Image (cartoon, rainbow, N blue to C red):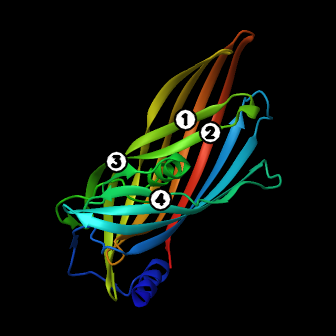
Amino acid sequence: MHRSWFALTLALTCGAAGPLVAQQTFQFRYAPSVGSAVRTLTQVEVATALTGFPAVPDGTVLEEETRFGATQTVVGAGDGRFRVDVALDSVWTRRRSSGGPWKTVVDSLFAREPVALVVSPRYAAATVAGGGPAEAVLRTLYGMVAGPGFAFPEELMAVGSSFPTGASIVTRVRVPADAGIAVDQRAYADLTLTLDSLQQTEGDEIAYLSFAGTFDPRAIVQESESGSTQITLAGSYAGRLVWSAAWNAIASVVARLHVEGTFRVQRGGGSVDAHAVWETTVRHQLRP
């Protein structure tokens, strides 16, 4: 696979030498061999701008960077589906506030049992075993279009056409309690992919896809002993995805997600109005 890896890297960084001029359709299929494995690296960067939060100055920006290393290994096949074990090799997170010094808060190897998935030829996946922190991390990862969990169409796809995946793009938005208002919510949107172009390298066919849209507006009420919080969330997202037929994998993803939240907190001493903006960047790629 060394030649195939070199060709894929060349295509992603420099552009493939041979666009598929004659072939303008593509059939997405997940068909790995048992025993094959792919290693991935995903980086998620979040900048959160706060206004009106009672315990921090207006204009405070909280930054967080997280990197996930994972290995997907095909351990079996049957009934037209594939058993895939996904192991988190490492998780690294650091945070800072308003340009201050970075503080590493997670730096660990996940020496735990892998999460077991059953993946269909259309790349749809279901968890069959595993759990705990590793599964929670993977659900976050795959909710950002960086792994199995959405379905490619049955039919051939033409360049320029779009298809619903039957899955959602999901982003988690948080503010720590020490800002004066604790926030931990998610924004959702239906995921549709558009096939932009096809390219061919030595030993591989590469599909370039894009996605963009708006998150479903959400109105949430949180109740606690100290009072209630009314939350509204809305936003948008856009990104690009590269699929490698030779590797049976998402070769790379770049996505940007924008979410805005407004908050009204009703407490015994009156009300507090606040606003937060989350800017998230996701970068995902295969590792050799």
Residue placed under numbered mark 2 in the picture: 174
Residue sitting at x 56%, y 26%: 231
Residue placed under numbered mark 1 in the picture: 185
Task: State if disc 2 and disc 1 touch (CB < 8 Å).
Answer: yes
Spatial CA distance of label 1 from label 2 is 6 Å
First in residue order: circle 1 vs circle 2: 2
Spatial CA distance of label 2 from label 3 is 22 Å
Nearer-the-camera pick, 82 or 210: 82
First in residue order: circle 4 vs circle 3: 4
Spatial CA distance of label 4 from label 3 is 23 Å
Task: Judge left or right: residue 270 versus residue 218.
Answer: right
Question: As drawn, which residue projects farthest toward the left?
Answer: 155
First in residue order: circle 2 vs circle 3: 3
Q: Quadrant of residue 269?
A: top right
Residue placed under numbered mark 3 in the picture: 167
Spatial CA distance of label 4 from label 1 is 27 Å
Dot 2: few (<14), some (14–19), or many (≥20) neighbours within 10 Å?
some
Q: Secondary structure at mark 2?
A: strand
Dot 3: few (<14), some (14–19), or many (≥20) neighbours within 10 Å?
some
Task: Judge left or right: residue 179 versus residue 68.
Answer: right
